[in-house]
Every structure is written in structure tokens, then in C-alpha cells.
């Protein structure tokens, strides 16, 4: 019998932040890398070391030890330190597809400074893998993946062909028992051979030829005796040939023969935990992630690329924002299976990235407004889909024109309330106010100072300020302020009479007609084809008032008894079901004695707006939820009352019903879901994930160590049985109320609004008996006393979920143009059809656009008046195009185009 090759790959798995915050783990990282560099330099038998496939490890170290960069560079050049390809080992389901791509691009760019990155898609610990990953890797020139979690039971070999929906594939090495199968190599040759032999028995049915022995685990230090003990082990036996090697070396000679094949995502718990409950813990993190992604991907980047001259592209600032996003994408970071210090840091990074996005988007919008030739109010469409929509605009006059509706709360108030038209103040107060005022002329998004004057007489100082909706940037505000300071200084006891001249105007809701994709049009109120109305009628059996809102396209009727609503006669939407959760940050687990609460004690319904442009109804439901799960009896105990406010909104000419729930979470150890009935029984769901929609059945593979709970992540929308739900932030859903029988099908989609547990990991859970991390109490996971908000929309028979997701989550923008620019009143900055747009940005002065085909049919992507070349994720040219190119089923493409 020939000897079996045993390929030992020394590595460490470096969770940058997890059960310790970043700075604490980094202290350990610096020690580890200090020792590793010495070891590699002094001991050539310690052939190579894998730095966990992520460049963050290198940067985090060099920030503390910049003097060691040449040593790392030399070891990398000699092939003894393996770099990248990722910047960080991200979670693939909780972040956008763009975040995954930017992560890979950041890692490859940073790794280039060290002579290049490993051509292996190393994905050792992610909690499952998205369907399009093979395509993303191939687009970066990578033909191998290495995976562990999520691999289904039908894969019975240590490698398989993993195929994306577009039919591109990689060879996936399967770490059958994880990335630590060769961790902690003993300093004893006999013991090492015994370990290898035992492991060979454990995985023998999987082995194709050589055995990959991954020598490392979480935060593990290298064993300096490795080279010696491997040599000794080779000398004392004839069964194995041990070699210390790199992952790339091992894979370059690994067999491609006889591999099983798998198409699509990897989310099975057949042999390893997929930890599906991370989707629903710390719902605040998921919402902040989505809002930062939206600001960067859908506003700051496209607006800056399309409306600023190429030389004003804010590349460095966007790089800073993306660095925050990519760091947060780490699997223990966005997954929030971490201590509170870590989650606090994650929230802060998302806040900063969002602020950068908002600030940059606003600058580009200002440039856009000034570029228009005609003055006026303009609607700008950040989606590539042409569409109309409801906007809030400020119009001159005091009576709303036809087909508009006054904005109720803020009527008459913008910038400075009407009642403040004339004020008499003392000099000291005016000086204080002056010190706080900026020198710009803008008061709010659509109010600018038009003129200012100051005068005085024996009785006091007179200040007149004129407001208007025309943008002015030539008003000499700072010299006016200096003048006023001088007068106040000379007469400190004087009164100051302030007069604000403000032409009559009004804030109204209006529907604007079609605005081109990534384009603009005058924001003129258009005639409403389907105005929305609220109808109240007495006469139901209980004597209650029936309340409904409808627009001829969809009807929403509120049930005043239980606070739910019906859509087109289908009842039971918005039913809130609260149950116990004795799980942890990784997994839901019901308590032994669950007390479900699904009926409110009282319901109060208020009409907020009555149309014709927008109708809104608020339902306030009073519940009593158990207070917590008792740790010894594992039953829900105690009682807390809570008011859940649900706002339903319907707009003219739209079929989407918008829903928002908010409440202050009073309880611990519980899971709150909203039930949404399906028009037809469903055997599967279709949920958006990175660059794709994935179809999932009613079951999930699991095992005794982790129940296969069919709760799944959805990025922005999920459809089942004729219902589509659009939601803000990645959310967890499950198809429930399943009829077993010849026509098996689920009748309800449950959406998780909150999952509150107090443990990072736990022992002895009903659905996962063994811990998945340190057994540590983490108070923040309870979200107790915190305002919880969930925003989603529901639509029956939605035929274009991508377009409607933009309608639900990416509103039309309003700009007030001063006039005097060059741009036409109506147009598109990037007219593109035939595919979804994922990114619009500038690279090396050119416009770079990424699109994907969400359908199973080949498509022609038409890009009006643009030519250029298709590129891969490394920016290498694939082929030229002129005006259009074809894109295969489920394909992703990136093109660059110089200015026309
Ligand atoms: Zn990890």
C-alpha cells in the first residue's frame, strides 16, 4: 500500500473581535505575529504559515509594529507567509453583495503590496455560503474555495464542484470536521502519527487522496516544534508522508476526479452548525448595516459618480467608509455573536459609514441642483428603474393644488415656525444666537436666506431677514454678522427687533409622474389615477366602526378587535406572536414551557392621514408579555405590559402596503414575530441574497447537535405563496402553519421582529445542546428597555420585486434648483436597462458600473450612449462593448466607460 500524503497547513483563525473586543485580541495578535516572524526566520523547517486568508490580520499587526513590514514582505515574497485574498472573513448573508466584492478587492489590493494574494477563496468559518460565491471567486480569477459549515449531507467527499446559479463553478475543498482538524500538533512523533491515523479513520469515507491537516484553530499560536516532529514522524512509520505546506500548494495537486457537484447556497447543518439564529439577534445591528449600505451603494457613490466632475470623485473618503463596512462584515461582528463592547464598536462603525455616505450624497445632490438650467423643484430617482412616486415638496401659496395633500404635522413650519415672524429680544440673547449660527445661507433643505439688513434708532436695533425657497450663496452673511456684533457691542442694553419675511408657502405631499432611472424630472404634482381614501362605517356585529383604506388597486381593512388587518379580504396580517427564547446569540431555542401571547388586551386605532395622496392609520395594541424565562424551571414567568404601535400606510397609485411597528421592549428571553398570511399555500420561498434570489423549501437539514430550523435570512425581499414582503435590513423569516398531506404547503410567513437572549452561547439548549462559543452573559442581547422598530411593506402578486424593493426602501429625492446651470429639466445620467444595477462609481476617472441578471434567461444589457469595456473584479479587461452587451442567466458583469 502506498503512503498517504498528509499535507499540514499551519495557520491561525483570527476572529478580530468576538468574546473579547478588538484591542484585547490585538494584544494577543501582536504577540503571535512577533513570535511567528522570529520562528519563520530562524527555522526553515517551519515552511509556511497561513494568515487566515484575511489582510486585516496584517494591517492590525503593522499598525503596532510598522518597523516589521519589511520582514513580512520578505517572508511573503519567499512564499512563507500566505496573504489574503480577503480583507476580512465576512458573513455572507448579513451584508450586501457589494460588501463581499469590496472586501475581496480591498484584500487583493492590500495583498498586492506584499507580492500578491493566495488564489484560494478561503471561507473556513462563515455561517453558510451564498449561492453566487463561486461566480464572485471566478470573476476575481480564483478557481478554488475552502469551506466547512453549510455543506449538505449529499456531499460525501472531501471536495466537490460548487456551482453558482450562472453555472460557473469552483473546486471546493471541504473541511469535513472544520479548520482545526490538525490543531495543536503534539511535540511527540508517535502521538502525532496516532492523531493522523485516528483522523484518517474519522474521515476515511470522504478522502479522495491526500489528507489536508489544518494545523491551527481560533487564535492559536504556532507550535515551534512542528518541523522537527514532522521529520521524526516520517522516520518512524511507512503509512504516511507528512509535509508542511501551503493551502495553495496542496490544492494545486489535489484531484479533480470523481467530485460530487452542488449548485447554489450552502446552508445545511448536517455536519456543522450554521448558527442560523444570528440573523435575528441584535436587530438594531442589521438595520444599521442596511442603512449604511444604502447610503454608500445607492446614494453617495452613484450621485458622486454621475453628478460631480471626475476630478471631484471623493475616493479617499469612500475608501474610509468602505473600510468601516468591511471590518464590520467580519462573521463575529455583523453577526453580533459578541460581547457588548464589540457590538457597540460595530454600531459606531456603521454610524460613521452612514454619516460619510449621507454627507457625500448631499454634496453631490447640491452640485446636481446647481447644474440645472431652470430653477424649480426637481425629483431625482436613485433607482435604475424609471418610476413615479410620492414626495414631500414645498410649493408657494397657501392652498394646496389639486391632487396634493398638506403634510399634516409640519403645516406651515419649515426652518422657522410662522409664529416667529416678529420677535423682540435682548442684545445678550442675540449675541448668543449669532455665535451659534453658521455663515451659510441655507436654513433647511429648501429654505435659504435671500437677504438681511440691519438698522437702528433710539428705541433699538432692527434686524430683517428674508427667507425664500431659492438657493442663494451670495448673501454676505458674515459681514452682516460682524456689523451686528459691532452694534450690539456699542449698545449692550438695547432691544433687538427681529423680523422674518417669509413668502407664504406650504409643504405638500404629491405624486410625481415617471422619473427616468438614475435621472430627474420636474417635481410637478401629477393627476392621481388611484387616489387613496379612508372609509369608516358603523355596522359590524360588535357595533365597532369598520375602518379601511383603499386606492382601487388594493384595500386594507383594519380589525379593531385584534389589531390585525386584511389585504383585499385576506385577513390576519400583522398578527404579533410573542414566545419565549431560551437560546443564545447563535440559535433560537424554545423554553420547556412556552407561553405564546398573540392577542392584545386592548386596541386603539387612529387615522393620521386620509389621502388622497397618502393615508396612514396607527394601531396601538396593548399586550401583556411574560417578563423572562426562569433559568431553573425554564418556563416563562412574570408579566410586563407593552404598547406596540403599528402604522399602516397606503399611497395613491401604489399596491404596496407599508407597515412600521415600534415598541419599547419590556421583556427578556423572548422572540417576537409578525405573522403574514399567504394567499396560496407555499411549498417554498424565494428570498433575495447577494446578486441572486434563492429558492428554499419548508425544511432545513440539521442534526441532534443543531436542530435544522428552517428560519432563513432575507436581504431586502422574500416571496411565498403570492405574497412578497419588502423589509429594511436583513430579516429572518420562516414559512409556518404547514398542512401535511398530499398538498403540503405553508399558509403563513413569520417575520422575526426581535429575538432577545442574554447569552453569547449557552449549554443544554433544546435545539442546540452544546455551546457554540464562550458561555458568557451579554446583557445587550436582551435589547431590554430599547426602542425596537421594524419597517416592511407587503404586496400581493408582485411581479418585479427588485423594482418594488427600490420603491419601498429608496425614495425619490427632492432638489431645489436655483437655475443658471446647463442641465436639461428632464433626463437620465445613466440610462441602463436589462439588468439590475449593483454599483455605480468611479475608478481611475472612468465610470464603473456593476450589473447582474436576476433571471434565468439571457438578457441584453443596454447602456444608452456609453461604450467601454467589460472588466473582471481585478479590473482586467475582458472585452469591449458599445451601447449593449449580453449577460447570461444569473450573470454578474462590471463595465467601465470613459465620459461620452
Ligand atoms: Zn471565526
Image (cartoon, helix red, strand yellow):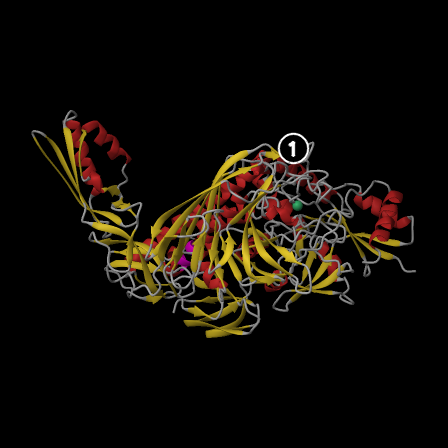
- 306 or 61: nearer the viewer: 306
- 861 or 727: nearer the viewer: 727
Measured from the top left, where is residue 133 in percent x and y?
A: 62, 60
Reading the image, the residue beneath label 1 is 630
- 113 or 415: nearer the viewer: 415
Which residues, given as a range, are shown in magenta?
299-305
Q: Does the residue labelled 1 lie within 8 Å of ligand 1?
A: no
Measured from the top left, where is residue 726 in percent x and y?
A: 49, 56
Q: Quadrant of residue 459?
A: top left
Is residue 886 placed above or below 125 in the rendered structure? Answer: below
In the rendered image, is residue 325 in sight? yes
Residue occupying the point 82% across, 41% down: 186
Q: Would you say residue 877 sits in the magenta stretch?
A: no
For this view, does 290 lie left or right of residue 165? left
Measured from the top left, where is residue 229 in percent x and y?
A: 84, 44
> Circle 1: is it few (<14), some (14-19), or many (20+) Cα within 10 Å?
some
Residue occupying the point 32% across, 63% down: 528
Q: What element carries label 1?
A: loop
Q: Would you say residue 303 sits in the magenta stretch?
A: yes
In the rendered image, is residue 140 in sight? no
Q: Quadrant of the N terminus?
A: bottom right
Ligand 1 is found in the corner quadrant, namely top right
- 549 or 49: nearer the viewer: 549
Dominant secondary structure, magenta: helix
Q: Quadrant of the C terminus?
A: bottom left
Number of numbered discs on residues: 1
Farthest residue, direction top = 493
Is residue 617 placed above or below 638 in the rendered structure? Answer: below
For this view, does 578 lie left or right of residue 297? right
Q: Quadrant of residue 402?
A: bottom left
Amino acid at each position: 500500500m502506498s503512503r498517504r500524503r498528509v499535507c499540514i497547513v499551519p495557520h491561525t483563525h483570527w476572529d478580530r473581535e468576538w468574546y473579547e473586543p478588538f484591542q484585547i485580541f490585538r494584544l494577543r495578535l501582536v504577540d503571535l505575529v512577533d513570535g511567528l516572524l522570529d520562528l519563520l526566520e530562524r527555522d526553515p523547517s517551519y515552511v509556511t504559515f497561513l494568515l487566515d486568508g484575511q489582510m486585516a490580520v496584517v494591517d492590525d499587526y503593522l499598525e503596532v509594529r510598522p518597523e516589521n513590514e519589511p520582514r513580512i514582505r520578505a517572508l511573503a515574497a519567499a512564499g512563507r507567509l500566505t496573504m489574503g485574498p480577503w480583507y476580512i472573513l465576512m458573513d455572507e448573508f448579513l451584508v450586501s453583495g457589494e460588501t463581499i466584492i469590496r472586501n475581496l478587492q480591498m484584500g487583493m489590493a492590500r495583498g498586492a503590496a506584499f507580492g500578491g494574494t493566495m488564489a484560494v477563496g478561503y471561507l473556513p468559518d462563515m455561517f453558510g455560503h451564498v449561492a453566487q460565491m463561486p461566480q464572485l471567486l471566478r470573476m476575481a480569477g480564483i478557481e478554488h474555495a475552502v469551506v466547512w459549515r453549510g455543506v449538505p449531507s449529499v456531499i460525501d467527499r472531501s471536495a466537490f464542484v460548487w456551482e453558482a446559479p450562472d453555472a460557473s463553478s469552483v473546486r471546493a475543498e471541504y473541511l469535513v470536521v472544520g479548520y482545526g482538524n490538525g490543531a495543536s500538533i503534539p511535540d511527540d512523533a508517535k502521538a502525532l502519527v496516532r492523531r493522523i491515523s485516528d483522523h484518517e479513520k474519522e474521515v476515511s469515507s470522504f478522502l479522495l487522496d491526500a489528507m489536508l491537516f489544518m494545523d491551527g484553530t481560533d487564535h492559536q499560536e504556532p507550535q515551534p516544534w512542528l518541523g522537527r516532529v514532522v521529520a521524526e514522524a516520517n522516520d518512524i512509520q511507512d503509512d504516511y508522508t507528512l509535509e508542511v505546506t501551503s493551502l495553495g500548494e496542496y490544492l494545486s495537486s489535489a484531484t479533480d476526479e470523481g467530485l460530487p457537484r452542488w449548485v447554489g447556497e450552502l446552508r445545511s447543518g448536517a455536519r456543522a452548525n450554521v448558527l442560523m439564529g444570528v440573523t435575528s439577534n441584535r436587530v438594531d445591528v442589521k438595520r444599521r448595516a442596511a442603512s449604511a449600505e444604502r447610503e454608500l451603494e445607492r446614494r453617495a457613490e452613484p450621485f458622486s459618480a454621475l453628478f460631480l466632475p471626475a476630478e471631484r470623485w471623493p475616493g479617499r473618503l469612500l475608501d474610509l467608509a468602505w473600510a468601516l463596512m468591511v471590518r464590520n462584515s467580519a462573521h463575529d461582528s455583523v453577526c453580533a455573536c459578541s460581547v457588548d463592547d464589540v457590538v457597540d464598536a460595530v454600531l459606531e462603525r456603521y454610524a460613521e459609514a452612514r454619516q460619510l455616505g449621507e454627507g457625500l450624497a448631499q454634496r453631490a445632490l447640491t452640485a446636481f441642483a446647481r447644474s440645472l438650467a431652470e430653477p424649480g423643484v426637481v425629483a431625482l430617482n436613485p433607482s435604475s428603474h424609471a418610476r413615479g412616486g410620492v414626495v414631500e415638496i414645498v410649493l408657494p401659496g397657501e392652498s394646496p393644488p389639486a391632487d396634493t395633500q398638506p403634510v399634516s404635522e409640519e403645516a406651515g413650519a419649515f426652518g422657522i415656525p410662522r409664529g416667529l415672524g416678529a420677535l423682540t429680544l435682548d442684545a445678550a440673547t442675540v449675541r448668543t444666537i449669532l455665535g451659534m449660527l453658521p455663515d451659510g445661507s441655507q436654513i433647511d433643505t429648501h429654505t435659504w436666506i435671500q437677504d438681511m439688513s440691519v438698522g437702528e434708532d433710539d428705541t433699538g436695533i432692527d434686524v430683517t431677514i428674508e427667507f425664500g425657497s431659492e438657493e442663494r450663496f451670495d448673501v454676505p452673511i458674515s459681514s452682516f454678522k460682524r456689523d451686528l456684533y459691532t452694534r450690539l457691542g456699542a449698545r449692550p442694553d438695547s432691544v433687538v427687533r427681529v423680523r422674518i419675511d417669509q413668502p407664504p408657502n406650504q409643504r405638500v405631499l404629491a405624486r410625481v409622474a415617471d422619473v427616468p432611472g438614475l435621472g430627474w424630472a420636474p417635481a410637478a404634482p401629477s393627476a392621481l389615477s388611484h387616489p387613496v381614501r379612508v372609509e369608516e362605517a358603523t355596522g359590524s356585529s360588535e357595533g365597532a366602526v369598520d375602518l379601511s383604506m383603499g386606492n382601487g388597486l388594493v384595500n386594507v381593512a383594519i380589525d379593531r378587535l385584534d389589531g390585525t388587518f386584511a389585504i383585499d379580504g385576506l385577513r390576519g396580517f400583522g398578527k404579533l406572536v410573542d414566545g419565549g427564547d431560551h437560546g443564545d446569540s447563535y440559535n433560537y431555542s424554545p423554553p420547556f414551557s412556552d407561553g405564546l401571547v398573540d392577542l392584545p388586551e386592548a386596541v386603539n386605532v387612529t387615522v393620521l392621514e386620509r389621502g388622497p395622496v397618502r393615508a396612514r392609520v396607527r394601531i396601538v395594541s396593548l399586550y401583556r408579555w411574560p417578563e423572562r424565562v426562569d433559568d431553573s424551571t425554564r418556563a416563562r414567568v412574570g408579566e410586563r405590559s407593552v404598547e406596540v404601535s403599528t402604522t399602516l400606510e397606503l399611497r395613491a397609485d401604489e399596491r404596496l402596503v407599508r407597515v412600521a411597528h415600534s415598541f419599547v421592549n419590556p421583556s427578556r428571553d423572548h422572540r417576537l414575530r409578525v405573522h403574514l398570511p399567504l394567499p396560496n399555500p407555499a411549498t417554498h420561498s424565494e428570498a433575495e441574497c447577494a446578486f441572486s434570489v434563492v429558492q428554499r423549501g419548508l425544511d432545513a437539514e440539521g442534526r441532534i447537535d443543531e436542530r435544522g430550523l428552517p428560519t432563513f435570512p432575507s436581504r431586502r425581499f422574500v416571496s411565498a405563496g403570492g405574497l412578497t414582503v419588502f423589509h429594511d435590513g436583513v430579516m429572518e423569516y420562516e414559512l409556518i402553519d404547514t398542512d401535511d398531506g398530499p398538498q403540503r404547503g405553508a399558509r403563513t410567513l413569520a417575520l422575526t421582529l426581535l429575538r432577545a437572549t442574554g447569552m453569547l452561547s449557552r449549554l443544554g439548549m433544546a435545539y442546540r445542546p452544546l455551546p457554540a462559543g464562550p458561555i458568557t452573559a451579554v446583557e445587550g442581547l436582551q435589547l431590554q428597555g430599547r426602542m425596537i422598530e421594524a419597517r416592511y411593506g407587503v404586496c400581493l402578486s408582485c411581479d418585479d420585486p427588485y423594482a418594488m424593493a427600490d420603491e419601498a426602501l429608496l425614495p425619490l429625492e427632492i432638489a431645489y434648483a436655483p437655475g443658471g446651470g446647463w442641465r436639461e429639466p428632464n433626463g437620465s445620467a445613466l440610462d441602463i436597462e436589462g439588468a439590475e444595477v449593483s454599483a455605480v462609481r468611479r475608478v481611475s476617472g472612468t465610470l464603473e458600473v456593476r450589473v447582474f441578471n436576476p433571471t434565468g434567461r439571457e438578457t441584453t444589457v443596454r447602456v444608452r450612449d456609453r461604450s467601454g469595456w467589460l472588466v473582471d473584479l481585478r479590473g482586467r479587461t475582458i472585452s469591449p462593448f458599445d451601447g449593449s452587451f449580453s449577460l447570461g442567466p444569473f450573470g454578474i458583469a462590471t463595465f467601465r466607460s470613459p465620459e461620452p
